[in-house]
Image (cartoon, rainbow, N blue to C red):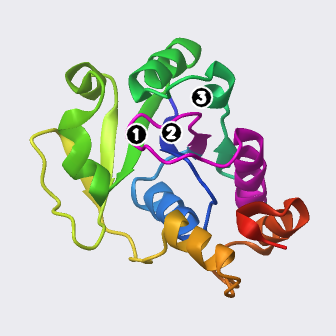
Amino acid sequence: MRRIGLFGGTFDPPHIGHLIIAEEIYEQLQLDEIWFIPTYVPPHKDTKTTDSIHRKNMVERSISGNPHFRLKTIELERAGISYTLDTIKALKEDYPDDDFYFIIGGDMVEYLPHWHKIDELVSLVQFVGVERQGYPLSSPYPIKFVNVPIVEISSSRLRERLEEGRPVYYWMKKDVLDYIREKGLYGFE
């Protein structure tokens, strides 16, 4: 039986904060793999996201070279609103012998009571909460909390910097920045 960490998100764009969180959880919980799952349409955000093909390609470049990171496009292929419950049910059907650990940031811990069919979801997967400055680490749901180095980088802040033409060296892997330049994303010229 494998122990798989699931890391969902828009990854618009992916950055080193994502990679550090995933690697720390992989190591601390002694998981076998971490699967990155880009959402198609996030149910909890109103913002428009970059086209899914670009986000998929950026995640692919971001995790390349790490032998225990994988890209799973299950939500992109399904399209529509990416409810986590639907994803977990599909993964459990495809991988019935594996245990799944769903990684969420501190901001999502607080929002968990509003997730689609949360009571059913918590019965199917172990949530792993990651500390995020300004958000409490408590929940009425059974969450395994993991301390990771706090890197206060967010995709929204990264997008702002890119659109302002400010440097983002070290905020993301060079391959991802090269892709953004090549495709002219986030106002990059």
Amino acid, disc 2 = Ile
The CA distance from mark 2 to mark 3 is 17 Å
Is the residue marked by circle 3 packed among few (<14), some (14-19), or many (20+) residues within 10 Å?
many
* Residue at the (67%, 49%) spot, across then down: 50
Question: In the drawing, does residue 144 fall left or right of residue 43?
Answer: left
Amino acid, disc 1 = Tyr
Which residue bears the numbered disc 2? Answer: 4
- The answer to whether residue 115 is visible is yes
Who is closer to the viewer here, 60 or 65?
60
Give the answer, above or below, for where 29 lies relative to 95.
below
* Residue at the (13%, 47%) spot, across then down: 139
Which residue bears the numbered disc 1? Answer: 101
Label located before the other in sequence (2 or 1): 2
Q: Can residue 88 be found in the magenta stretch?
A: no
Amino acid, disc 3 = Glu
Who is closer to the viewer here, 45 or 21?
45
What is the quadrant of residue 94 in the picture? top right
- Which element type, helix, strand or loop, lies under badge 2? strand
Circles 2 and 1 in contact, beta carbons < 8 Å: yes
